[in-house]
Amino acid sequence: MVESENVAAHEVIGTSRRDFLRRTGGAVAAVTALGTSAAQEKPNAANEVQLSQIHASSEAPEKAPGPFLPANKRVGFAIVGLGRLSINQILPAFAKSESCKPVALVSGDRAKALKLAAQYGIADSNITDYAGFEKLKEMPGVDVIFIVLPNGMHREFVVRSAKMGKHILCEKPMANSVAECEEMIAACKAANVKLMIAYRQQYEPINRTLEKAVREGKIGTLRSIVASNSQDQGDPTQWRLNKKLAGGGAMPDVGIYCLNAARFLSGMEPVEVFATIVQPKDDPRFREVEARCEVIARFPNDVTATFTTAYDTHRSTFLRLEGSDGFAEMDPAFGYHGAKLRFVKLMDGKDTEMAPSIEEEDQFALEMDHMASCVTNNQQPHTAGEEGLQDQRIIEAIYRSAATGRSVKVVPPAGSTRGPALPPVER
Ligand code: NAD
């Protein structure tokens, strides 16, 4: 029996964007200025446009986006690297953000940067190339530098940003090695700037609802996690297949979603990994990096995570958490859009499927708004550098295991790798 949108399903459902941002402390600058009880309850309350509800109370209320901060109060972002992610996801996401605005662009291709600057209202004088990166220091309005470059360039540009005293949002994977991650964290600490790794899933309400449901025992005791994040890479000349620029193949690029999800959804850290990689000799794409990686990770309390990631299969993404009393599944799981969540549990003696309806949110707008709220409130980001460092430690253990054919122990972090918990997802 499918119970979409029924009462049982609503046990585990999520939230609206406004509620979510209120709980994440998003866009608080205006709230501080307002000082009213309404403003304390809802950031940007003064900017809210109220419309009457025309539906009966038996219908779900219509939801509006925002309220948004005015442009002159928004946190300014410089986008570094104008590739697919910046152009197709990040720049468009500013229209959905409540508290951020794009103010500067860094690119080796000035003609491309000028076109994008015109589209997003960025001054031509706020465009620079990589050699002139340090010009960001004096550019008006740059609060946060968002590094969206190939993985092998993250370390250099994070360290250069920290030296300018700018806060940094850095794409995943954080870097190519544990040593690089440690250097980045140290540089940001020394400069007293915030460093956040762009783990968009951790800010997204469907994932957050799943995390809460598992934490509250909705599937009983968590026993195992099974996941895949795979796709077919084309162009053999792209940087993702170059070890120096990518750090590895499918594992650090797309496998990291399975690994990070296993960690934040279980709330536990793996203590041992066993892995095998496939690097077909006859495929020119995989001269330097693996095509596929299969991992078994052991967590405390006999919880296991098994995942596969590939660069040579058709797109396949799913995640299943198996518990003593039921399972939760996202299929598809890791994309920008369209994640679907369902739970299967015994109800009245029958296996019953519950598919909560959770409003989709722009994951990039959510993560940028979180970064903005950390800057405004002087808080540690939820996915700070330590979160990226721990994934990198585990990835290095995964490669060691694949190279030796033996399982490899992973030293768990001394404490939580995440900053202050995000306020809970409301029903
Ligand atoms: P891309 O190849 O589309 O863009 C990379 C940009 O870097 C290009 O504009 C390119 O010109 C520039 N660049 C500068 N120096 C370069 C060099 N030496 N070699 C190659 N390119 C160079 O890549 P992308 O998909 O935008 O990925 C960028 C980063 O974002 C990566 O770290 C990637 O892992 C991450 N990413 C994250 C997500 C996510 O969902 N969070 C999705 C895709 C990519």
Image (cartoon, grey):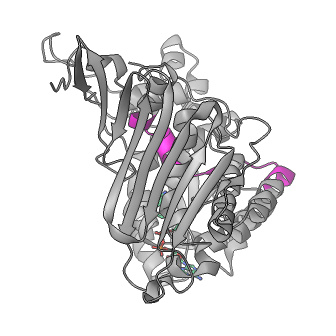
Magenta region, residue range: 188-207
Residue at the spot 52% in from the left edge and 44% down from the top edge: 305
Q: Which residue is nearer to you in this view: 261 or 41?
A: 261
Residue 355 image-quadrant placement: top left
Residue 383 in sight here: yes
Residue at the spot 41% in from the left edge and 23% down from the top edge: 219
Residue at the spot 57% in from the left edge and 56% down from the top edge: 77
Direction right: furthest residue:
190
| Left or right placement of residue 232 versus residue 145 in this view | left
**Residue 406: x, y in percent?**
67, 61
Of the 4 image quadrants, the one containing the N terminus is top left
**Residue 293: x, y in percent?**
51, 65
Q: Is residue 2 magenta?
A: no
Q: Which residue is nearer to you in this view: 250 or 155?
A: 250
Residue 377 image-quadrant placement: top right
Q: Which residue is nearer to you in this view: 422 or 191?
A: 422
Query: Is residue 144 shown above or below 265?
Result: below
